[in-house]
Amino acid sequence: MYRTITNLAVTSVCLLGLSACGGGSSKQQTNIPPPQPAPLDYQALLNDSVSDVMPGIVLHIDSPEKTVLLAAGLSDIASQSPMQVDAQMPVGSAGKKATALLALMLYEDGLLDIDDTLDTWLPNELVERIEYGTDITLRQLLTHTAGVHDYLAPDTAEAWFEAIMSDPGTLKTDAYALAFSIDKAGDFAPGTGFNYSNSGYLLTGLILDSVLGEHHAGALRNRVLIPLGMNNSYYNGVEKALGTIISGYFNLNGEVLNTKVAYENIGVADAPLVSTVEDMTLLLRAVATDDTIVSSSIRELMIGDDNLTDIGDDVYYGMGMMKDIINGYPVYHHGGDEPGYATTNLYIPHNDTSITVFVNCGVAEECENEQNVLVQTILSNEF
């Protein structure tokens, strides 16, 4: 799952003193400097934001002026363990950028063609169970323009959640999750619309496995994580021996569930990574600005204006990345929401600022509301 960024009101930016705004006297006061807003105390903000709904928070801000790395609250309620700045957490759809990046690296290497159809790589018995399957391309899967039914759509999400919670200890990979959406009608003919579909990234994961002849976790580690120095990240479920995730809390009809035991055994290409805030900043900046492992041609496919789909309200989707226009400026991002975990991961080019926030609650409305207030406060101050 993912969230867009609510556009900031210009008035709020004016109130924070971050831009020049009209009104007031035209008389110049050359001897009196304008009042400066007090610096935001981020630790106090995090402390005040912790609640029964949102038990723990980690924040990383990286800009030319400063680096902020802070934590507040609890990583586990039962043990009262304090949240740490290096907490490892499933980042949900924020990891889609890593899946898209790997697919495009293989494309650039000539190992696959993103304009080939599913039947190029996947068995006919699977493709035939996906409406329009023989017409769908990898490019369309990556851009959510394939029309594939989303396994996390309202008509199937409950069955998925019940399945993972009733059998939390068994590893679930792409084929397992895809079973909840195959044999379902497509949302539209490929290339004729946009609908965010996690199933499209499950199919991408199966394509990567077919091309590589093995699970793509190893290639993701060798091609992306290691070169970028993402030393505290790993493929969720598949590589779970490499770390331990914090607890995640999901309010289901008044009952708060700790979803850790289920989510540490889910390894799917639509939400592949366990990571830290600092590592997610490295990944985002690599896609948006860094030529270390991301070529200009790959960056153009992921976030170039010619490859973005307008999904309304100044929001655009590329490949594993989104672009919002806020107060006239672009912001590149892709967050993630899972039952128990929520990630914000965004980059503001005009002031070279990245913001990554982890909270160990997710999806439930109260959690989303509290997280949105926190993120908007941070974004207003840094914008």
Image (cartoon, grey):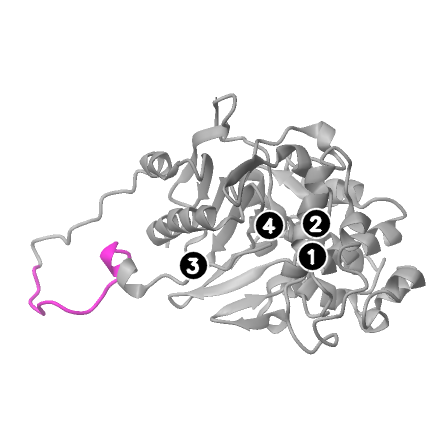
Q: Main secondary structure of the magenta part?
A: loop
Task: Point out residue 298 in the picture as x, y percentages from the top left corner.
Answer: 68, 60
Cα separation, mark 3 vs mark 1, equals 40 Å
Quadrant where the N terminus is found in the figure? bottom right
Answer whether labels 3 and 4 touch (C-beta < 8 Å). no
Question: Separation of disc 3 and disc 4 at Cα?
Answer: 22 Å
For mark 1, what is the residue? 156
What secondary structure is found at the residue carrying circle 1? helix
Badge 2 element: helix
Say which mark, if any, is on residue 94.
Answer: 4
Question: From the viewer's perspective, is the residue at label 3 or at label 4 nearer?
Answer: 4
Q: Name the residue that disc number 2 marks.
A: 160
Question: What whole-number distance in Å separates the C-alpha atoms at marks 4 and 2?
Answer: 20 Å
Q: Which amino acid does label 2 sit on?
A: Trp
The answer to whether residue 347 is left or right of residue 114 is left
Task: Examine the image and state in which quarter residue 40 appears.
Answer: top left
